[in-house]
Amino acid sequence: MATEKQFLRSLTMEKPQRSAMKRLERRLSFQGIEKPRFLRIEEREEEMGVTDERKKKKKKNKNKGPAQKRGDSPLHLACRSGDLLQVREILFNGEQSGNLRGLISGQNIEGETPIYVAAETGQVELVRELLKHSDVQSASIKAKNGFDAFHIAVKEDHVDVLTELMSSLPESAMTVGPSNVTALDTAANQGHIDVVNLLLETNASLAKITRNNGKTVLHVAARQGHVEVVRALLAKEPGLNFRSDRKGQAAIHMAVKGQNVDVVTELVRPDPSVVNLEDNKGNSALHIATSKGRSAMVESLLKVEGVNVNACNKQGETALDISAKKRSEDITSLLRRAGAVAASDRAAPASPAKQLTQTVSEIKHDVHTQLQQTHRTGVHVNRIKKRLKKLHTAGLNNAINSSTVVAVLIATIAFAAIFTLPGQYVEEPTPGYRLGDAYIATSAPFVVFFVADSLALFISLAVVVAQTSIVVVEHEAKKRMVSIINKRSWWLTLVTTAMGTIIMFATLGSMCYCIVYQKMEQGNKRKLRRSFGGSQSRSLSGFDSDSDVHNSSMYVL
């Protein structure tokens, strides 16, 4: 015990003695003595770096009252306490000082304005007084909870305050809160039937406004089980019964999730066909009530005329299949007494809507398959196109190379032919010639040959230059060049074939004529040789031998 007293006294020591205190604490911890709670808090604050100023601030906040914590102004406090005289005095002083608008629109830490505080506490006289100096903008300022003065009055069921607000500022009824929640949504969610009737009488179109999730005010009232609100809404807007949210669920789907059977009765009274509405998953109200285990709801739904007890959802399940999966014997017995069967036992054909859905799905699948096949075919065609282009380019290059080789050969032969003339040259002074001239230089055939040979040389050189400079780079130039070569080649082939044919037949005809003529001459000479005698025959024999040599040389040529 003495050790504990020393330990407690050490807590009041100055900072230089803290090290000794820590050693003592470590010793006590080894002895199994638990540290006091305030000491552990102090150590944790020291570790976190809490300064003395922060400690003082915390103590100061403890001494603050609720008004100081909320940051209320004097006008807030007067409205919260319901002091009408003080409110008027503050407003009068603010009007004299020119700060009236700032007083009316002033917000505390929670974002609440004076009129918000007055509406929340149900101070009708204060609200009336504040409305004299307010407009729609200042009255619609929202607190941090997303509500303005009108919405908070709806939530607190202050009908008199709402009447006063709507008489002065009718536009305030159209304001929305978080998630696009209207004042009518708030009243329906709370079950304030007087507020709902007041809002519907003022503006029945509020019932048609949906939340961000697509739910109407009827969805909210049906889910919460407020029968009177549901009845009032359907009396004003019967079409709300068939409005669905983003999940495809109508108010009947929301009602069977609750516990109030009377809500379902009210919903099916205007039009019993609403009981067979399906959501996006194909579930009717009977499917949902069965999955939630609401036997009373299932029994109420089965009493509705025209209910489809064997409807299948998109998973191919009936209400009986769901109850069997959930192992709910009470609901299973109710469904069997109503004639429900499992989906596997059904022999009825699918509904037209489902058949249409299935057909559309098959068409979409076929179209998707065709598109994929078209894409694959296009890819294959592109590959073939690239290969053909490569082959075509290779063919063009081969044709260009071949024509280049031919042009080079022609140029070489033409160049050599100019400097290699046939016949003999003048070696001795001769009239009309110069030494070294060819005897055929002045003949007309040689001039024609020289001109043609020069043309062949320069044309071949031009073709070689064009193909090695322009055609090699330009693909279109290659195609044009090959097209020109192909067209000219046909004409050259035809002309060459015709000329060759003429020359061949002329040569063959000349040879035949020479041979026949030689044979005829030899025959005539033999006849002459027989007609003449000895000496004459010998003299003729020398002549015959000379003519034979001449004819044989002609034959050889």
Image (cartoon, helix red, strand yellow):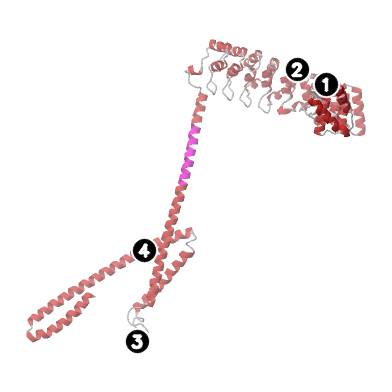
Instruction: Judge the density around disc 1: few (<14), some (14-19), many (≥20) Cα neighbours within 10 Å.
Output: some
Amino acid at dot 3: Glu
Image quarter of residue 29: top right
Residue indicated by mark 3: 427
Query: Viewer-nearest of labels 2 and 3?
Result: 3
Q: CA distance from mark 3 to mark 1?
A: 144 Å
Element on which disc 3 rests = loop
Q: Earlier in the sequence, mark 3 or mark 1?
A: 1
What residue type is disc 1 on?
Answer: Thr
Is 487 included in the stretch rendered in magenta?
no
Cα distance between the residues tagged 1 and 4 = 111 Å
Snapshot quadrant of residue 115: top right
Inspect the image, locate mark 2, and give the three-letter code of the amino acid beneath it. Asp
Which circle, 4 or 3, is nearer the viewer?
3
Q: Secondary structure at mark 4?
A: helix
Question: Which quarter of the figure is the C terminus placed in?
Answer: bottom left
Which portion, as a residue range, is magenta?
363-381
Quadrant (top left/top right/bottom left/bottom right) for the N terminus: top right
Picture layout, residue 45 above or below residue 264: below
Which numbered circle lies on residue 491?
Answer: 4
